[in-house]
Image (tube, rainbow, N blue to C red):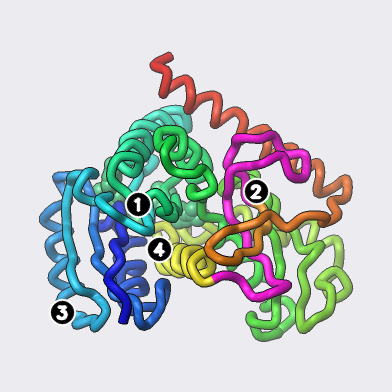
Amino acid sequence: MSEPIRVVVTGAAGQIAYSLLYIIANGEVFGKDQKLVLTLLDIPPMMGVLEGVVMELHDCAFPLLTEVIPTADPAVAFKDVSAAFLVGAMPRREGMERKDLLSANVKIFKVQGEALNNHAKKDVKVLVVGNPANTNALICSHFAPSIPKENFTAMTRLDQNRARAQIAQRLGTDISNVKNLIIWGNHSATQYPDAANGTANGKPVTDLVEASYLQSDFVTTVQKRGAAVIAARKMSSAMSAAKAAADHIRDWWHGTESGRFVSMGVVSDGSYGIPKDIVFSFPVEIKNKQWKIVQGLKLDSFARSKLDITTKELLEEKEEAMAVCNGN
Ligand code: NAX
């Protein structure tokens, strides 16, 4: 058994965290021999609910969980953390403009970026789940200049998992046989789910599934899957979001097997002609806790037009977010 590492989950009294905390504390992210101290951040009105979550974590009797620290203070939550799941965010309320939501969340992620900068380990791995996830990750990194910007990522793994599930169901094959579907761009309805490099049972997905489906219903089903879950469940995706967050950090921590890539929102380095310094979902491979954007994949004119749309949205979000930060 190694020394415990500290891991923070924000929005810890919320519905995604309720599923996520079980997966983390059960050793499915950092390994079955890695002891953990969990710090749980939420806002002051949620401290009572959070106390109930803490009771349940104790009652699960997880062998790896050495301590649980609930708090409303970012300085306590982020102290010496090696990994941060930033799930908590302001939800969109009825009548709220996209701009209002962005503005509320920029303020939250500014505070949390500063707290990471001042209190976390310098090699902390940060995953932003709270929406708008890509731009929140960018803001967080901006306010944590002492931490490498490669350490800030946004979650598009749920979209990737949704894409894999769609293809596996269509082909009637086991999901573990479906690989390398890519999510490009923003975690929003402009994302581009791309099957051009995907394989199923070692064969190109494009040889197995009609192009007309891959370019229309497949794309829109994945883009709108979150809304479909809300319409059915009357609540947003939580179990699947928690599983995806765990997948994202587990792969970052332990690496990806050769030839398999995963989608992550990362700070663009200009690959594939995407402007630098926006958080954009790319296919990545991971070794020694470092991700690398997979290079040399072909993008046809259809794919390029989709990437342009999602890029434009991310540039607009960045501009709005920076205006909020600068008090404009
Ligand atoms: P809930 O509303 O159930 O929980 C959010 C929790 O965050 C609440 O307990 C709230 O008090 C807390 N919170 C608010 N402000 C906070 C702050 N400043 N510090 C700490 N905690 C704070 O939402 P849930 O369903 O858990 O979703 C959380 C976020 O994930 C939302 O922003 C949602 O839009 C986003 N999602 C992102 C997904 C992705 O793929 N990137 C998919 C799932 C999900 O929709």
In the image: residue 192, left or right of residue 251: right
Q: Are marks 2 and 1 in contact (CB under 8 Å)?
A: no
Mark 3 or 4: the one toward you: 3
Q: Is residue 165 above or below residue 127?
A: below
Name the image quarter holding the C terminus.
top left
Q: Are marks 3 and 1 in contact (CB under 8 Å)?
A: no
User: Callout 2, which amino acid?
Assistant: Gln
User: Callout 4, which amino acid?
Assistant: Ala
* Disc assigned to residue 191: 2
Q: Which of the two discs, 2 and 1, labels the residue nearer the N terminus?
A: 1
* Disc assigned to residue 260: none
At 59% across and 43% down in the image, what residue appears?
267
Mark 3 or 1: the one toward you: 1
Q: Which of the two discs, 3 and 1, labels the residue nearer the N terminus?
A: 3
State the SS at label 3.
helix
Tell whether circle 2 marks a residue whose Cβ is less than 8 angstroms from ligand 1: no
The residue closer to the viewer here, 328 or 153, is: 153
User: What's the CA distance linking mark 3 and mark 1?
Assistant: 29 Å
The residue that label 3 is drawn on is 59
Query: Which residues are drawn in magenta?
Result: 255-281
Name the image quarter holding the N terminus.
bottom left
Tell whether circle 4 marks a residue whose Cβ is less than 8 angstroms from ligand 1: yes
The residue closer to the viewer here, 257 or 21, is: 257
State the SS at label 4.
loop
At 49% across and 50% down in the image, what residue appears?
151
- Toward which corner of the image does residue 261 lie, by quadrant? bottom right
